[in-house]
């Protein structure tokens, strides 16, 4: 027993030294969870769980923000797409204001792109990092709690063993005390035999031995328990708590880094967003109202000059007969025949459906109409843009020529590439069959030839348009004006005739059969397509077999004479050419469309009739 006590004292001294070293280590690690919160294991477990939940909550916040950023970027892109210029609005985007708006749309699209960058960066960098950290922390926390529970279970088991050894020692000690008392009573009892006394003695010795053994076991368990308890609260449990502390600090540090990282993601696109804002400001500052005004003038300028003043005509100083004759001549000239080119003094009978199928000349009219329709562009304009004002016509022709030149350059490059490919194939047949390129070469040559023909044609149009002098007055300005119940027809020489709109001398069907006097209408033709106007014959009637009415047409009396101020090339059906200085007879004055009908003698003792621009002639009407 003394040996046991000596061994216990030596072990206690070594444990004291260990405790001293542990205390020194603890003093160097002050303010740690293992030292300060050794008895708060459950609270620390709750605290770390709430911390990780907070990290998950921040991750959910970022996910919701990413969804908002993505939706915002998508709506910005849809907004930009909805306000992109339509094809029919492309012409308006030559103005600086519309160009600025298009640049604003571009910058807003770039802004949407930066919001998408923010969304993607938050998703890939921050949210992924937060999710990974949260998962790692939960696994480490679970392991720490498991290790702490295992340590606590070991300590609890040791405490149970100590308690059991203590109870055994207490029972053995009581039994040994009873055995000593029984032996003492038996030894003092003279009635008992020596053998019985010896038996009591043996029992006492056995109980004392059991008591000593239980005492030694209790001392041993106590020593183990104390050692384990000291290690538990000084080393094992603090290590677990310190791991929880490190885990929580790692979460807190990660929280800080992720918040700063999210701000850095936003800051990284801030310079680009600032440049987008600068681009929007620059787009706004690029708007120039004077430049837009000039472009409006350039787009809509016709090249015509405003009409001259209308002279005053004193009717009291004019011969009534001449006024009446002038009125009669102009009133009759204002009414057109079924072909829209010839005025009739008499119209006895109507021709069935314009006698379309009864005359070769009228078939020529139909063919001319079809040809003119086929020469129209996709947008309904004439192929040579002759229906446009001079300035606009030249611009259209120049744009068309530039377009054709670009197509020719592209097609030439394509053809050169095919020729090089063919040469390579011919040099090395393993690379390909040269005949496969032959068809493409032929097609390219055909396209190139067609483009060159079109280019030459439009260059001719432009050359003619550039040679023709700018008209001095607009056809729109020459329209008849109603003044006090009179119609005044203006002429290029400045003279004017007033006519009453009296229809008594007009045929009943004149209004229903009249049409535009412009040669571009397709119905205005020269004398070669008009009955009674060619070869000096005044009574020629080209009426077919299906005619059920007859028409009498008389040759028009000249209203005056005119002198050509400029040369004119007859490029449209119904017009006639004229040379500068040439004199012609006026047989139908301008009806407000910018064209005057004239007549001249030809070499075969006949007459050539047709339309010329009013602005190209100087008229002198008979009194």
Image: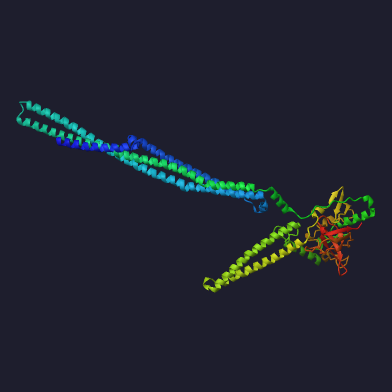
Residue 5 seen in the figure: yes
The image quadrant where one finds the N terminus is top left
Relative horizontal placement of residue 608, taking residue 96 as reference (left or right): right
Relative horizontal placement of residue 221, taking residue 446 as reference (left or right): left
Residue 21 vertical position relative to residue 438 in the rendered view, above or below: above
Question: Residue at the location (45% across, 43% down)?
Answer: 258
Question: Residue at the location (39% across, 37% down)?
Answer: 47
The image quadrant where one finds the C terminus is bottom right
Q: Position of residue 102 (x, y in %)?
A: 62, 50
Q: Nearer the viewer, residue 44 or 465?
A: 465
Q: Nearer the viewer, residue 394 or 571?
A: 394
Q: Position of residue 370 (x, y in %)?
A: 75, 63
Q: Position of residue 264 (x, y in %)?
A: 49, 45
Residue 37 seen in the figure: no
Q: Position of residue 252 (x, y in %)?
A: 41, 40
Q: Nearer the viewer, residue 557 or 547?
A: 557
Count of numbered badges drawn on the protein = 0
Residue 72 vertical position relative to residue 323 in the rendered view, above or below: above
Relative horizontal placement of residue 560, taking residue 135 as reference (left or right): right
Residue 197 quadrant:
top left
Relative horizontal placement of residue 302, taking residue 45 as reference (left or right): right
């Amino acid at each position: 027993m003394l040996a046991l006590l000596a061994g216990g004292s030596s072990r206690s001294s070594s444990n004291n030294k260990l405790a001293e070293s542990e205390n020194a280590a603890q003093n160097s690690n002050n303010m740690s969870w293992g030292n300060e919160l050794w008895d708060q294991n459950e609270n620390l477990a709750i605290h770390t769980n709430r911390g990780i939940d907070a990290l998950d909550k921040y991750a959910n916040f970022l996910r919701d923000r990413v969804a908002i950023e993505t939706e915002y970027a998508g709506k910005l892109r849809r907004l930009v797409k909805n306000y992109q210029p339509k094809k029919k609005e492309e012409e308006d985007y030559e103005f600086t204001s519309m160009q600025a708006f298009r640049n604003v749309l571009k910058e807003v699209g770039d802004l949407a792109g930066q919001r998408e960058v923010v969304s993607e960066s938050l998703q890939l960098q921050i949210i992924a990092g937060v999710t990974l950290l949260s998962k790692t922390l939960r696994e480490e926390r679970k392991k720490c709690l498991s290790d702490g529970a295992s340590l606590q279970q070991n300590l609890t088991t040791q405490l149970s063993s100590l308690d059991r050894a203590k109870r055994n020692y207490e029972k053995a000690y009581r039994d040994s005390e009873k055995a000593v008392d029984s032996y003492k009573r038996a030894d003092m009892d003279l009635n008992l035999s020596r053998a019985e006394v010896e038996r009591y003695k043996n029992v006492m010795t056995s109980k004392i031995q059991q008591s000593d053994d239980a005492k030694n076991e209790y001392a041993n368990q106590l020593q183990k328990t104390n050692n384990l308890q000291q290690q538990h609260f000084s080393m094992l449990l603090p290590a677990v708590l310190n791991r929880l502390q490190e885990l929580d600090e790692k979460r807190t540090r990660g929280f800080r880094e992720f918040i700063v990282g999210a701000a850095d993601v936003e800051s990284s696109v801030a310079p680009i967003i600032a440049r987008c804002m600068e681009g929007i400001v620059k787009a706004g500052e690029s708007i120039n109202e004077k430049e837009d005004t000039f472009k409006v003038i350039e787009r809509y300028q016709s090249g015509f000059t405003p009409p001259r003043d209308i002279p005053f005509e004193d009717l009291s100083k004019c011969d009534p007969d001449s006024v009446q004759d002038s009125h009669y001549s102009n009133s009759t000239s204002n009414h057109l025949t079924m072909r829209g080119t010839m005025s009739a003094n008499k119209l006895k009978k109507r021709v069935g459906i314009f006698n379309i199928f009864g005359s070769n000349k009228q078939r020529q009219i139909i063919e001319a109409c079809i040809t003119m329709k086929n020469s129209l562009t996709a947008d309904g304009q004439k192929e040579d843009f002759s229906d446009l004002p001079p300035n606009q016509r030249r611009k259209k022709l120049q744009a068309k020529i530039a377009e054709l030149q670009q197509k020719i350059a592209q097609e030439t490059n394509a053809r050169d590439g095919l020729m090089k490919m063919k040469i390579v194939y011919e040099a090395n047949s393993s690379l390909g069959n040269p005949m496969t390129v032959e068809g493409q070469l032929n097609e390219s040559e055909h396209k190139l030839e067609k483009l060159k023909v079109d280019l030459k044609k439009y260059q001719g149009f432009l050359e003619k348009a550039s040679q023709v002098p700018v008209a001095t007055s607009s056809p729109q300005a020459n329209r008849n004006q109603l003044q006090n119940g009179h119609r005044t027809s203006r002429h290029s020489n400045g003279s004017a005739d007033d006519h009453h709109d009296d229809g008594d001398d007009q045929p009943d069907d004149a209004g229903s059969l009249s049409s535009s006097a412009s040669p571009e209408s397709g119905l205005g033709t020269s004398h070669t397509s008009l009955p009674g106007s060619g070869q000096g014959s005044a009574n020629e009637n080209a009426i077919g077999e299906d005619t059920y009415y007859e028409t009498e047409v008389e040759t028009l009396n000249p209203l005056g004479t005119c002198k050509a101020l400029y040369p004119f090339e007859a490029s449209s059906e119904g017009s006639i050419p004229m040379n500068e200085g040439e004199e012609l007879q006026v047989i139908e004055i301008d009806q407000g469309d910018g064209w005057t009908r004239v007549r001249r003698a030809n070499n075969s003792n006949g007459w050539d009739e047709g339309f010329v621009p009013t602005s190209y002639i100087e008229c002198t009407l008979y009194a």
